[in-house]
Image: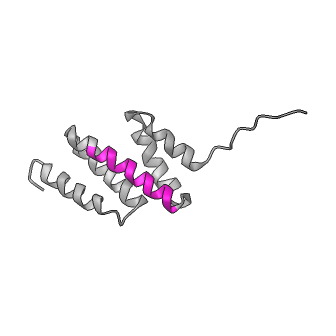
Amino acid sequence: MLIEQCEPAATDTDTYAGADAGADADAGADADAGAGADVLSPHEREEAAKDELARARAALQNGDLAAAEAALVRAAEFDPNNPDIAELQEQARAARPDGG
């Protein structure tokens, strides 16, 4: 009996998951958010939004407001009804030098 080993086909979600590999992948996440957001399942969209929220939190902690705000835009593209987005947007506004 011959048993073949099959590899699963790559999907858009595999591409998005690869964006978690490192900080330099944020540019890739931008492209994936725009191109892949429409083909993700509701659960995948929710998880992608959570990933972007984690990036936003980390960027806020590091004082990188531009990165935080970009991650929040991507999170809103994936899951616009996530209540954490508005909370983090408010934190980002308050962290601006002009006070928001």
Image quadrant assignment for residue 78? bottom left
x%, y% of residue 57?
27, 46
65 sits to left or right of 26: left
4 sits to left or right of 41: right
Q: Which residue lies furthest to the front in this view?
A: 1
Majority secondary structure in the magenta region: helix
Image quadrant assignment for residue 79? bottom left
Could you tell me which residue is drawn at 27 percent across and 41 percent down?
Answer: 58
**Is residue 32 depicted above or below 39 in this figure?**
above
Is 47 part of what is drawn in magenta? yes
x%, y% of residue 92?
19, 52
Q: Please state the extent of the stretch shown in magenta in the rendering.
A: 42-57
Could you tell me which residue is drawn at 56 percent across and 44 percent down?
Answer: 14
Is 5 part of what is drawn in magenta? no
Could you tell me which residue is drawn at 39 percent across and 48 percent down?
Answer: 51
**Is residue 65 depicted above or below 46 in this figure?**
above
x%, y% of residue 70?
32, 50
